[in-house]
Image (cartoon, rainbow, N blue to C red):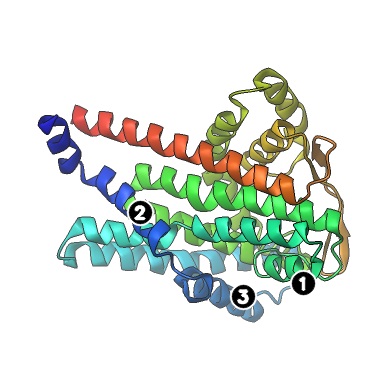
Amino acid sequence: MEEIFNQLYSNGTLLVMWGALLFHLIIPIPREAHPVTLWHKFAEQLAEKVNTNTHYSQSLISGTLAWLLMVIPAILVLWALKPLVWQPQLFELALLLLALDWRSNEKLANGLTKALAHDDKKTARTLLSPVLNRDTSSLSALGLGKAGAETIIMGYGRNVVCVLFWYAIADGSGALIYRLTAELARAWSPSRARYSPFGLTVTRTVAILDFIPLRLFALFIVCGNKAFHTFKTMLIQSPSWPLPGPAWLLTSVGNKLELSLGGPAIYNKRKSVRSKIGGRIAPSAIHLSQVQTLIAWRVFAWILIQSLILFTVYQGF
Protein backbone atom coordinates (compact mmCIF):
# COMPACT_ATOMS: atom_id res chain seq x y z
CA MET A 1 0.00 0.00 0.00
CA GLU A 2 2.82 2.37 0.89
CA GLU A 3 4.53 1.58 -2.41
CA ILE A 4 1.37 2.44 -4.38
CA PHE A 5 1.04 5.72 -2.46
CA ASN A 6 4.68 6.58 -3.19
CA GLN A 7 4.13 5.84 -6.88
CA LEU A 8 1.07 8.09 -6.96
CA TYR A 9 2.96 10.84 -5.13
CA SER A 10 5.84 10.65 -7.56
CA ASN A 11 3.49 10.94 -10.54
CA GLY A 12 3.38 14.72 -10.83
CA THR A 13 1.11 14.79 -13.88
CA LEU A 14 -1.59 12.81 -12.10
CA LEU A 15 -1.30 14.86 -8.91
CA VAL A 16 -1.58 18.10 -10.86
CA MET A 17 -4.74 16.90 -12.63
CA TRP A 18 -6.50 15.84 -9.44
CA GLY A 19 -5.25 18.92 -7.60
CA ALA A 20 -6.62 21.22 -10.31
CA LEU A 21 -9.98 19.43 -10.29
CA LEU A 22 -10.19 19.68 -6.51
CA PHE A 23 -9.24 23.37 -6.37
CA HIS A 24 -11.61 24.18 -9.23
CA LEU A 25 -14.57 22.44 -7.62
CA ILE A 26 -13.93 24.04 -4.22
CA ILE A 27 -12.86 27.57 -5.28
CA PRO A 28 -13.90 28.18 -8.90
CA ILE A 29 -12.88 31.34 -10.74
CA PRO A 30 -16.03 33.42 -11.44
CA ARG A 31 -16.80 33.76 -15.14
CA GLU A 32 -16.76 37.56 -14.92
CA ALA A 33 -13.23 37.56 -13.47
CA HIS A 34 -11.83 34.69 -15.54
CA PRO A 35 -8.88 35.54 -17.83
CA VAL A 36 -10.57 33.65 -20.66
CA THR A 37 -13.46 36.15 -20.51
CA LEU A 38 -10.95 38.99 -20.99
CA TRP A 39 -9.39 36.99 -23.85
CA HIS A 40 -12.85 36.70 -25.46
CA LYS A 41 -13.47 40.45 -25.17
CA PHE A 42 -10.06 41.25 -26.65
CA ALA A 43 -10.78 38.87 -29.56
CA GLU A 44 -14.01 40.74 -30.30
CA GLN A 45 -12.17 44.08 -30.21
CA LEU A 46 -9.48 42.76 -32.54
CA ALA A 47 -12.09 41.45 -34.97
CA GLU A 48 -13.74 44.88 -35.11
CA LYS A 49 -10.41 46.35 -36.25
CA VAL A 50 -9.30 43.75 -38.80
CA ASN A 51 -12.52 42.08 -39.98
CA THR A 52 -13.28 44.82 -42.50
CA ASN A 53 -12.69 43.05 -45.81
CA THR A 54 -15.67 42.29 -48.02
CA HIS A 55 -13.81 39.86 -50.28
CA TYR A 56 -14.02 36.21 -49.22
CA SER A 57 -10.33 35.32 -49.53
CA GLN A 58 -9.16 38.57 -47.88
CA SER A 59 -11.51 38.00 -44.94
CA LEU A 60 -10.29 34.40 -44.61
CA ILE A 61 -6.65 35.54 -44.58
CA SER A 62 -7.45 38.27 -42.03
CA GLY A 63 -9.07 35.69 -39.76
CA THR A 64 -6.11 33.35 -40.05
CA LEU A 65 -3.62 36.13 -39.25
CA ALA A 66 -5.77 37.35 -36.34
CA TRP A 67 -5.83 33.82 -34.90
CA LEU A 68 -2.04 33.55 -35.20
CA LEU A 69 -1.64 37.01 -33.68
CA MET A 70 -3.60 35.88 -30.63
CA VAL A 71 -2.24 32.35 -30.17
CA ILE A 72 1.47 32.57 -31.06
CA PRO A 73 2.31 35.23 -28.41
CA ALA A 74 0.43 33.14 -25.82
CA ILE A 75 2.50 30.08 -26.73
CA LEU A 76 5.74 32.09 -26.58
CA VAL A 77 4.87 33.54 -23.17
CA LEU A 78 4.13 30.09 -21.73
CA TRP A 79 7.33 28.70 -23.28
CA ALA A 80 9.39 31.57 -21.84
CA LEU A 81 7.87 31.23 -18.36
CA LYS A 82 8.57 27.52 -17.95
CA PRO A 83 12.33 27.83 -17.19
CA LEU A 84 11.65 30.67 -14.74
CA VAL A 85 9.11 29.03 -12.45
CA TRP A 86 10.22 27.88 -9.00
CA GLN A 87 8.03 24.78 -8.95
CA PRO A 88 7.02 23.35 -12.37
CA GLN A 89 4.15 21.32 -10.95
CA LEU A 90 2.54 24.40 -9.40
CA PHE A 91 2.91 26.17 -12.75
CA GLU A 92 1.16 23.27 -14.52
CA LEU A 93 -1.53 23.34 -11.83
CA ALA A 94 -2.17 27.04 -12.43
CA LEU A 95 -2.40 26.56 -16.20
CA LEU A 96 -4.84 23.66 -15.88
CA LEU A 97 -6.94 25.67 -13.41
CA LEU A 98 -7.21 28.46 -15.97
CA ALA A 99 -8.18 26.00 -18.71
CA LEU A 100 -10.83 24.05 -16.76
CA ASP A 101 -14.42 25.27 -16.50
CA TRP A 102 -16.61 22.65 -14.82
CA ARG A 103 -18.43 24.76 -12.25
CA SER A 104 -19.73 27.34 -14.73
CA ASN A 105 -21.48 24.57 -16.68
CA GLU A 106 -22.89 23.14 -13.47
CA LYS A 107 -24.09 26.58 -12.35
CA LEU A 108 -25.67 27.24 -15.75
CA ALA A 109 -27.44 23.86 -15.75
CA ASN A 110 -28.83 24.37 -12.24
CA GLY A 111 -29.95 27.91 -13.01
CA LEU A 112 -31.68 26.96 -16.26
CA THR A 113 -33.36 23.95 -14.63
CA LYS A 114 -34.77 26.13 -11.87
CA ALA A 115 -35.85 28.91 -14.25
CA LEU A 116 -37.60 26.60 -16.72
CA ALA A 117 -39.26 24.68 -13.89
CA HIS A 118 -40.90 27.96 -12.81
CA ASP A 119 -41.56 29.02 -16.41
CA ASP A 120 -39.27 32.01 -15.84
CA LYS A 121 -38.20 32.61 -19.44
CA LYS A 122 -36.69 36.02 -18.64
CA THR A 123 -34.19 34.53 -16.18
CA ALA A 124 -33.40 31.65 -18.53
CA ARG A 125 -32.68 34.08 -21.37
CA THR A 126 -30.44 36.15 -19.09
CA LEU A 127 -28.47 33.05 -18.04
CA LEU A 128 -27.97 31.93 -21.64
CA SER A 129 -27.16 35.33 -23.10
CA PRO A 130 -23.42 35.48 -22.09
CA VAL A 131 -22.67 31.95 -23.33
CA LEU A 132 -24.82 31.75 -26.45
CA ASN A 133 -23.80 33.25 -29.78
CA ARG A 134 -27.36 34.06 -30.75
CA ASP A 135 -30.02 36.47 -29.58
CA THR A 136 -31.89 34.97 -26.62
CA SER A 137 -34.58 37.66 -26.30
CA SER A 138 -36.99 35.88 -28.64
CA LEU A 139 -36.39 32.30 -27.53
CA SER A 140 -39.51 30.38 -26.50
CA ALA A 141 -39.61 27.77 -23.74
CA LEU A 142 -38.83 25.11 -26.37
CA GLY A 143 -35.97 27.17 -27.81
CA LEU A 144 -34.56 27.78 -24.33
CA GLY A 145 -34.70 24.07 -23.55
CA LYS A 146 -32.90 23.12 -26.77
CA ALA A 147 -30.32 25.90 -26.53
CA GLY A 148 -29.73 25.12 -22.86
CA ALA A 149 -29.22 21.41 -23.48
CA GLU A 150 -26.82 22.01 -26.38
CA THR A 151 -24.85 24.62 -24.39
CA ILE A 152 -24.52 22.34 -21.35
CA ILE A 153 -23.43 19.37 -23.48
CA MET A 154 -20.81 21.31 -25.42
CA GLY A 155 -19.66 23.19 -22.31
CA TYR A 156 -18.78 19.97 -20.52
CA GLY A 157 -17.38 18.46 -23.71
CA ARG A 158 -14.99 21.26 -24.57
CA ASN A 159 -14.24 22.95 -21.26
CA VAL A 160 -13.74 19.75 -19.26
CA VAL A 161 -13.26 16.65 -21.44
CA CYS A 162 -11.17 18.22 -24.21
CA VAL A 163 -9.15 20.29 -21.72
CA LEU A 164 -8.26 17.15 -19.73
CA PHE A 165 -7.48 15.26 -22.94
CA TRP A 166 -5.04 17.91 -24.13
CA TYR A 167 -3.55 18.16 -20.66
CA ALA A 168 -2.70 14.46 -20.88
CA ILE A 169 -1.16 15.01 -24.32
CA ALA A 170 0.66 18.33 -23.83
CA ASP A 171 0.54 19.24 -20.10
CA GLY A 172 -0.97 22.46 -18.77
CA SER A 173 0.29 24.58 -21.65
CA GLY A 174 -1.49 22.39 -24.19
CA ALA A 175 -4.71 22.45 -22.17
CA LEU A 176 -4.69 26.25 -21.88
CA ILE A 177 -3.82 26.84 -25.54
CA TYR A 178 -6.69 24.53 -26.52
CA ARG A 179 -9.09 26.46 -24.26
CA LEU A 180 -7.96 29.81 -25.66
CA THR A 181 -8.31 28.55 -29.23
CA ALA A 182 -11.79 27.17 -28.51
CA GLU A 183 -12.76 30.55 -27.03
CA LEU A 184 -11.59 32.28 -30.21
CA ALA A 185 -13.74 29.90 -32.25
CA ARG A 186 -16.72 30.88 -30.09
CA ALA A 187 -15.96 34.60 -30.34
CA TRP A 188 -15.53 34.43 -34.14
CA SER A 189 -18.10 31.76 -34.89
CA PRO A 190 -18.93 31.72 -38.63
CA SER A 191 -22.56 30.97 -37.71
CA ARG A 192 -22.85 34.75 -37.46
CA ALA A 193 -22.68 36.42 -40.85
CA ARG A 194 -20.11 39.05 -39.89
CA TYR A 195 -17.58 36.36 -38.94
CA SER A 196 -17.99 34.29 -42.09
CA PRO A 197 -15.44 33.48 -43.44
CA PHE A 198 -13.29 35.39 -40.90
CA GLY A 199 -13.62 32.69 -38.24
CA LEU A 200 -13.41 29.64 -40.51
CA THR A 201 -9.73 28.89 -39.89
CA VAL A 202 -9.92 28.85 -36.10
CA THR A 203 -13.22 26.94 -36.20
CA ARG A 204 -11.71 24.25 -38.40
CA THR A 205 -8.66 24.10 -36.13
CA VAL A 206 -10.87 23.51 -33.09
CA ALA A 207 -12.82 20.90 -35.06
CA ILE A 208 -9.55 19.00 -35.58
CA LEU A 209 -8.59 19.34 -31.91
CA ASP A 210 -12.08 18.24 -30.84
CA PHE A 211 -12.30 15.24 -33.14
CA ILE A 212 -10.71 12.53 -31.00
CA PRO A 213 -11.73 13.58 -27.44
CA LEU A 214 -15.36 14.40 -28.26
CA ARG A 215 -15.85 11.21 -30.25
CA LEU A 216 -14.28 9.13 -27.50
CA PHE A 217 -16.49 10.83 -24.92
CA ALA A 218 -19.53 10.21 -27.12
CA LEU A 219 -18.76 6.49 -26.84
CA PHE A 220 -18.81 6.93 -23.04
CA ILE A 221 -22.28 8.44 -23.40
CA VAL A 222 -23.49 5.58 -25.58
CA CYS A 223 -22.52 2.90 -23.05
CA GLY A 224 -25.29 1.49 -20.88
CA ASN A 225 -28.98 1.24 -21.65
CA LYS A 226 -29.98 1.34 -25.33
CA ALA A 227 -26.32 1.32 -26.33
CA PHE A 228 -26.81 -0.34 -29.73
CA HIS A 229 -29.79 1.83 -30.71
CA THR A 230 -28.04 5.02 -29.53
CA PHE A 231 -24.83 4.17 -31.40
CA LYS A 232 -26.68 3.25 -34.59
CA THR A 233 -28.80 6.43 -34.57
CA MET A 234 -25.73 8.52 -33.74
CA LEU A 235 -23.96 7.22 -36.84
CA ILE A 236 -27.01 7.96 -38.99
CA GLN A 237 -27.61 11.51 -37.72
CA SER A 238 -24.08 12.81 -37.14
CA PRO A 239 -23.14 13.40 -40.83
CA SER A 240 -25.85 16.08 -41.02
CA TRP A 241 -24.14 18.21 -38.32
CA PRO A 242 -21.35 20.54 -39.55
CA LEU A 243 -18.59 19.64 -37.04
CA PRO A 244 -17.64 15.96 -36.57
CA GLY A 245 -16.75 15.98 -32.86
CA PRO A 246 -19.80 17.91 -31.62
CA ALA A 247 -21.95 15.88 -34.05
CA TRP A 248 -21.19 12.62 -32.23
CA LEU A 249 -21.52 14.15 -28.78
CA LEU A 250 -24.81 15.96 -29.40
CA THR A 251 -26.44 13.05 -31.22
CA SER A 252 -25.28 10.54 -28.58
CA VAL A 253 -26.81 12.55 -25.72
CA GLY A 254 -29.92 13.44 -27.73
CA ASN A 255 -30.64 9.83 -28.63
CA LYS A 256 -29.64 8.47 -25.22
CA LEU A 257 -32.26 10.66 -23.54
CA GLU A 258 -34.53 10.87 -26.63
CA LEU A 259 -34.29 14.67 -26.61
CA SER A 260 -34.93 16.82 -29.66
CA LEU A 261 -31.89 18.97 -30.44
CA GLY A 262 -30.77 21.11 -33.36
CA GLY A 263 -33.28 22.69 -35.71
CA PRO A 264 -33.42 26.28 -37.04
CA ALA A 265 -31.68 29.03 -35.06
CA ILE A 266 -31.56 32.81 -35.43
CA TYR A 267 -28.15 34.54 -35.46
CA ASN A 268 -28.21 38.35 -35.66
CA LYS A 269 -31.80 38.32 -36.95
CA ARG A 270 -30.88 35.86 -39.71
CA LYS A 271 -32.37 32.37 -39.66
CA SER A 272 -29.86 29.55 -39.90
CA VAL A 273 -31.08 26.14 -41.01
CA ARG A 274 -29.68 23.37 -38.82
CA SER A 275 -30.50 19.69 -38.96
CA LYS A 276 -32.80 18.22 -36.34
CA ILE A 277 -30.98 15.57 -34.31
CA GLY A 278 -31.71 13.41 -31.30
CA GLY A 279 -35.14 12.11 -30.36
CA ARG A 280 -38.62 13.62 -30.24
CA ILE A 281 -38.93 14.89 -26.65
CA ALA A 282 -38.78 18.68 -26.26
CA PRO A 283 -36.18 19.49 -23.58
CA SER A 284 -37.64 20.94 -20.39
CA ALA A 285 -36.36 21.56 -16.86
CA ILE A 286 -36.30 17.89 -15.86
CA HIS A 287 -34.49 16.94 -19.06
CA LEU A 288 -31.74 19.53 -18.46
CA SER A 289 -31.24 17.96 -15.05
CA GLN A 290 -31.00 14.54 -16.70
CA VAL A 291 -28.46 15.87 -19.23
CA GLN A 292 -26.29 17.29 -16.46
CA THR A 293 -26.47 14.07 -14.40
CA LEU A 294 -25.66 11.86 -17.40
CA ILE A 295 -22.69 13.93 -18.51
CA ALA A 296 -21.34 14.50 -14.98
CA TRP A 297 -21.17 10.76 -14.28
CA ARG A 298 -19.58 10.08 -17.65
CA VAL A 299 -17.01 12.82 -16.95
CA PHE A 300 -16.15 11.09 -13.66
CA ALA A 301 -15.63 7.86 -15.60
CA TRP A 302 -13.45 9.73 -18.12
CA ILE A 303 -11.32 11.16 -15.30
CA LEU A 304 -10.85 7.76 -13.66
CA ILE A 305 -9.86 6.07 -16.92
CA GLN A 306 -7.53 8.92 -17.88
CA SER A 307 -5.96 8.70 -14.41
CA LEU A 308 -5.41 4.98 -14.84
CA ILE A 309 -3.84 5.50 -18.27
CA LEU A 310 -1.55 8.27 -16.99
CA PHE A 311 -0.52 6.14 -14.02
CA THR A 312 0.22 3.15 -16.27
CA VAL A 313 2.11 5.20 -18.86
CA TYR A 314 4.33 6.98 -16.34
CA GLN A 315 5.01 3.76 -14.49
CA GLY A 316 6.28 2.37 -17.79
CA PHE A 317 8.87 5.13 -17.86
Q: Secondary structure at mark 2?
A: helix
Q: Position of residue 226 (x, y in %)?
A: 69, 21
Compared with 227, 112 (above or below) is below
Q: Which residue is mark 1?
A: 54
What residue did someone put label 2 on?
22
Q: Residue at x 66, y 79 (%)?
A: 48
Kindly report the distance in space between the C-alpha atoms of the residues bearing marks 1 and 3.
18 Å
Give neighbour class at mark 2: few <14, some 14-19, many 20+ (Cα, 10 Å): few
Q: Nearer the viewer, residue 235 or 194?
A: 235
Using the rendered image of the protein, determine whether residue 213 is visible from the camera's viewpoint. no
Q: Which is closer to the viewer, label 1 or label 3? A: 3
In the image, residue 251 sits, relative to residue 141, either above or below, namely above
Q: Residue type at mark 2: give it.
A: Leu
**Seen in the image, is 3 located left or right of residue 13?**
left
**Type of the residue with mark 3:** Glu
Label 1 sits on a secondary structure element that is loop
Residue 14: x and y, percent? Answer: 28, 43
Crowding around mark 1 (Cα neighbors within 10 Å: few <14, some 14 to 19, many 20+) is few
| Residue 104 lies in quadrant | bottom right
Categorize mark 3 by other alpha carbons within 10 Å: few (<14), some (14-19), many (20+): some
> Mark 3 = which residue?
44
The N terminus is located in which quarter?
top left
Who's the residue at 20% across and 30% down the image? 315
Element on which disc 3 rests = helix
Q: Quadrant of residue 51?
A: bottom right
Q: Where residue 297 sits: x, y (%)?
A: 52, 38
Proximity of marks 1 and 2: CB atoms separated by less than 8 Å: no
Labels 3, 2: front one: 2
